[in-house]
Image: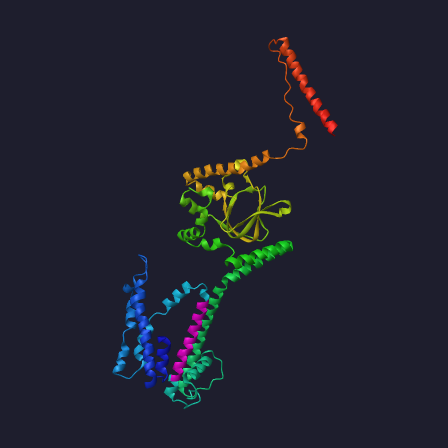
Amino acid sequence: YNIWFCTVRLAFPYHSPAANMYWVACDVISDAVNLIDICVWQPRLQFVRGGRPHYRKSPRFKTDIFSILPFDLLCLNFEFSSIYRLNRIVRSFFEFSDRLENVMAKAYIWRVARTTGYLLFVLHLNACAYFVASEHQGIATTTWVYDGNGTAYLRCYYFAVRSLINIGGLPEPTTTFEITFQMSNFFIGVFVFSSLIGQMRDVIGAATAGQTYFRASMDGCVAYMNTNRIPKMVQNRVKTWYNYTWTAQGMLDESELLDKMPLVMRTAIAVDINLATFQKIDLFKGCDQQMLVDMLLRLKSIIYLPGDFVVKKGDIGKEMYIIKGGAVQVVGGPDNSIVFVTLKAGCVFGEISLLQSAKDGGNRRTANVKAHGFANLFVLEKKDLFDILIHYPESQKVLARKGRKLTKAKAAPAKTDAKKEEKPKGAFLFETKPPTPKFVPASYEPPQAVLSSWLSHNQLWMDWFTLGLSQDLIA
């Protein structure tokens, strides 16, 4: 308000007894806003020790105090004019601009608007200077100056636009003053517009840098696939992955962004996203909290397309998965057409395979798991877990004990099912033959014992013969 209206009121004849009361009201509101900001909001800002000094101890505080000194009270003794408010201009606009840029989700929109505002303000200053020059020369005295028709500010602003942008078709200056003024306009216009155009190019380039990187990456991948004559079906799936990944998260690899942050920031983000989920996993209950935090920092984000198999039955399990978004299905049967269960965001699977010993060949997957739609999963690899457990021996013991329990609990149903398998038809007629008694010539046996043993042996064969005959009769 002060930067724009103080200059225009100073240059154009906008002060009159009828309008001055409205100008005073607007000035009072503006001063009240500045005073509240200086006295209430700015001292509440927090600064770390060793960083920027507190607001009231900074040089900017002195500048702000100077900016609200009521020099316009001099209007009570002198003519009413906005020249007494020029000290208001020294208040910084750039702090507001920086803070607004930091809180906006799409900061490039504000950067474009700010650069456009700079351009309009330069034209505004030139319009004010042109009107002052016209008054100095005399309104409508020559063909170059303002002729006094229409709205003065609008006509002067139109002249400034054509003059600074060098559109041409302007009236020729006739006096030395007019020629000097017009030449200054041309030089300033070339400098200002070249600077603003360059700044606008940088702003737009920064706003589209991510999209440019995405297009370059995808074009390079497509060129590689065409060079190696990859089948079109595979190419289409790769393109789908590129497009979905960029649309979903605005980047191809989240780790590129997180790696630029300090460890404390990465930890805060990881804890906020996944710590609650990790604490619910039975395998990790009772483990050191710091160990869980270290595990969160090792997670890798992977996006699966619809129908992609996350794990296949028989594969060696080397990682566990946390569903960040989307869903996966545990499938089986012919052509994997039977869906046993659907796991959604927050669910975990494959955690037992992390503790399987490498000498046993790894833990074989017992089911097929495929993505149901687009699925975004976090993956924790076995190697990363073992690297972490070196520093947490107590948690390592807890995990080993729980891993054995979970493995036994998983194996128990399989044994029960094996016992309940149906026997072949007719098996009850052909039970396992009892072992044939053998004579042991190690000691003397009475004749009665030998005879009894011989009869018992032959009775078994008679029983088998009877059973076989019965089966033939039934047939």
Assess whether residue 177 is covered by the magenta stretch.
no
Residue sitting at the far bottom = 141
Q: How far across and how far down the image is residue 351, in percent?
A: 50, 43
267 displayed left or right of 460? left
274 displayed left or right of 90? right
Q: Main secondary structure of the magenta part?
A: helix
Q: How far across and how far down the image is residue 84, in percent?
A: 30, 78
Q: Which of the two residues, 330 or 187, is positioned nearer the viewer here?
A: 330
Residue 473 higher or lower than 406, as above or below: above
Q: Quadrant of the N terminus?
A: bottom left
Q: Quadrant of residue 312?
A: top right
Q: How far across and how far down the image is residue 192, in percent?
A: 43, 74
Q: Residue at x 39, y 52 (%)?
A: 264
Assess whether residue 123 is covered by the magenta stretch.
yes
Q: Quadrant of the C terminus?
A: top right
Residue 325 higher or lower than 474, as above or below: below
Task: Report the magenta residues as a range.
Answer: 109-131
44 displayed left or right of 357? left
Residue 195 visible in the current orientation: no
Q: How far across and how far down the image is residue 80, in percent?
A: 30, 83
174 displayed left or right of 39? right
